[in-house]
Image: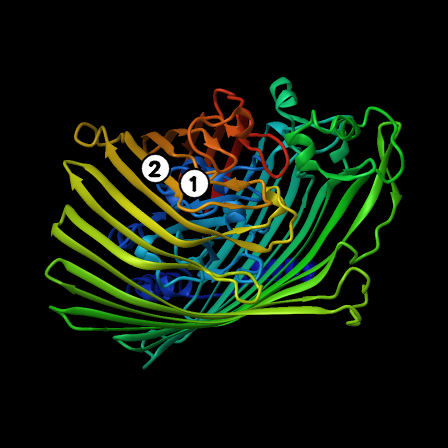
Amino acid sequence: MWKPFLISLFFISFHTNVLSQDNQDRKDSTAFKTEMLNEVIVNGNAILGSTFEAKNRTGSAVYISEKELLKFNYNDINRTLKSVPGVNIYEEDGFGLRPNISLRGTSPERSAKINLMEDGVLIAPAPYSAPAAYYFPTIGRMQAVEILKGSSQIQYGPNTTGGAINMISTRIPDEFSGRASIAAGNYGSRNTQLVLGDSYQNFGFVTDYFNYSSDGFKDLDGGGNTGFDKSDYLAKFSVNSNLDAKMYQSLTFKIQYSEEEANKTYLGLTDEDFEENPFRRYRASSEDVMNAEHQQYQLTHFIQVSPSLNISTTGYLNKFKRNWYKLTDVNLGERVSINNILSSPLDYPMEYQTILGNEDSQDDVMGIKANNRKYTSNGVQSIAKLRWGSDWLQTLEAGIRYHEDDEDRFQWVDRYAFQNRELIRTTVGVKGEDANRISYAKAVAAHFLYKLSINGLTVTPGLRYENITLGRTDYGSNDAKRSGLDLSERENRVDVWMPGLGANYRFTNNWSVFGGIHKGFSPPGSTDGQNPEQSINYELGTRFNHSGLKGEIIAYYNDYQNLLGSDLAATGGTGGLDQFNAGEVRVSGVEVLLNYDILKNSSEKLRLPVSVSYTLTDTKFLSSFESDTDIFGEVTEGDEIPYIAKNQFNLNLGLEHEKFSLNMGLRYTDAFRTQAGTGTIPANQKVDFNYVIDLSGRYFYNKHLTFSSNIINLLDETYAVSRVPAGLRPGHPFGINFSVAYGF
């Protein structure tokens, strides 16, 4: 599939050079189009579209612009979001390939409880039926990132408790332009990006190639690559009517393809081994590898029906297939999961010695599972916006989406043994024997949002509706051909209304107060009669700009009537993905963001911007229950939610000049528990606090050529990031990259 795609990119690049237009007329035309039809940009792929829009929402919103992204030029979404208050993250692989993101205390496992979007379209592999984000867009190719929390995100679902993250890919430029960058660093890390695009009176396009790879920073016993290689290809094509047309229209087609090979594992380390060498990897994980492919097709039509009414409609299709081939158990007479072995090595001494691989073993003692799955997500969504009034400025937004998605599991387990310290496959598993089922979802979603602005007051009542059918068709372990001999089926239906109300009052141009209340929701599983996750969420905040000190302070309170947990292998469960009720939970917190330029009044050529963010997240279960997943375990009323750090602090300090820029980022993450509990955290259930300093520098040789360097973990701090999927895992050690970029 990708070869003809690359050929088309080459053709576009070549064809651009033979097209002839009047350059000045074209520049004037595109500039006017951008100014007068800004809604084309916003409605086409963005939620906010600018920092200005984020600061004027009736709820919490953050817009990370291209300029901000380039400060550190991260390829890791975890590091990109660390400075955003209200975001909780626990890392897994050190590169952000499989992030675990929580917004305002939602369960962080595989980012399943938030809305992940690219260009305004849900991007998780199967956002309703199997939302665990084993695919995540390449953040290095994004032009902006938008984060919405609280009542400001009632328009976006299905998850409305924590919030939404929308990543905006490379936009079609206003004029012929391009850029090329290449970077290299330690651990064999390297990345390359090539972008080319142009716009004419009635046509525009952009192409983007991005490759990101590394040999990895872990040391595999016996040697071997522990890194990854991911390539991403993107193209957008747009046609539009003349600006003086009675009804301006545009049609934009986007195609994206990525392929990834990652030598990553679920196998971590015991506490004792982590203390001795946190970057060690056991020999039993030498065959572990993830192979994945992702495709996205998106067609967006925009029409300006009248000066006050426009409609944007998008059809989309996402396909994702992956096979994560990884160690799952040791069987010396009884099957023991790798999670149990590493969390209690003294209880399983023989199994622990087996995964070390220092001695020959009997046949079939180790199981390596082919977690082979295919996902499809497709739908059509349309949003209409009507504006009227002057003194009483009013907007009515109505949106509707029909969506379908599915996850096809066709998995098996191969059995292995160690011979001469090498893994040898001794039994080939029967395909479909481990899992042979399809989970699916069909959903109709609609929302209405009314906005009234009058004399400094903005009020936004809204209503969201979700009608969801969730089902599972299980063919059983003995029907690889899926003939239906041992078929079992189940289905669950959910019908829910989610109201919300936000308000913002601007006392002066430099001070406003906002707040809101809305109903939170996340879909349940496919078990008949299972209740969805529901909550009532409140927030109150203020935005201010006083003598150059800009900021935002927000307090929130999320009252869960029913929190849902998921049986994920990534969090120590069986991997069945069945959800379970976790009962009543309370999550409250404070979010602080402050920005100030120290040299604001003393220098015209230099800027010294300082940004400080702080997040307090307090969680408490209000009911008791038991679960088989390691991330919850046995829960007693009053326990805290695991994997949520109570305190987080981030400091960014910059020095900016027209010829160079320097930026330092320091982040502190509080210790957090890895199982529900209260009081002092037991050592074997704790991930200790850490502080990490990153540093970046850029030198602008001229308006086209830029040299830069990026240092990750400047002080080479050694720290743990999690105890799941199985055992302790380290954060990224000292890493340095050098890059050169050319743009025109």
Split into 4 quadrants, where in the image is the N terminus? bottom right
Q: What element carries label 1?
A: strand
Number of other residues with Cα within 10 Å of mark 2, as a class: few under 14, some 14 to 19, many 20 or more: many
Taking the image as shown, residue 14 lies to the left or right of residue 309, namely right
Between residue 358 and residue 707, name the one nearer to us.
358
Residue 740 at what x, y percent from top left? Answer: 51, 35
Q: Is residue 57 above or below residue 737?
A: below
In the current view of this chain or complex, which residue is farthest to the top? 276
Residue 188 at what x, y percent from top left? Answer: 64, 31
Q: What element carries label 2?
A: strand
Residue 549 image-quadrant placement: top left
Name the residue at 75% across, 47% down: 369
Name the residue at 53% across, 37% down: 91
Residue 525 image-quadrant placement: bottom right
Check if mark 2's residue and mark 1's residue have beta carbons within 8 Å: yes
Number of other residues with Cα within 10 Å of mark 1, as a class: few under 14, some 14 to 19, many 20 or more: many
Numbered circle sitting on residue 88: 1
Q: Which amino acid lies under the numbered mark 1 shown in the image of this protein?
A: Asn
Between residue 733 and residue 672, name the one nearer to us.
672
Residue 365 at what x, y percent from top left? Answer: 83, 37
Q: In this view, does 317 lie above or below 624?
A: below
Structural distance between the alpha carbons of marks 2 and 1: 9 Å
Taking the image as shown, residue 626 lies to the left or right of residue 86, namely right
| Residue 53 appears anywhere in the view | yes
Residue 585 at what x, y percent from top left? Answer: 40, 48
Between residue 719 and residue 42, name the one nearer to us.
719
Name the residue at 24% across, 34% down: 596
Q: Name the residue under label 2.
A: 615
Q: Which amino acid lies under the numbered mark 2 shown in the image of this protein?
A: Thr
Q: Of the residues under marks 2 and 1, which one precedes in the sequence? A: 1
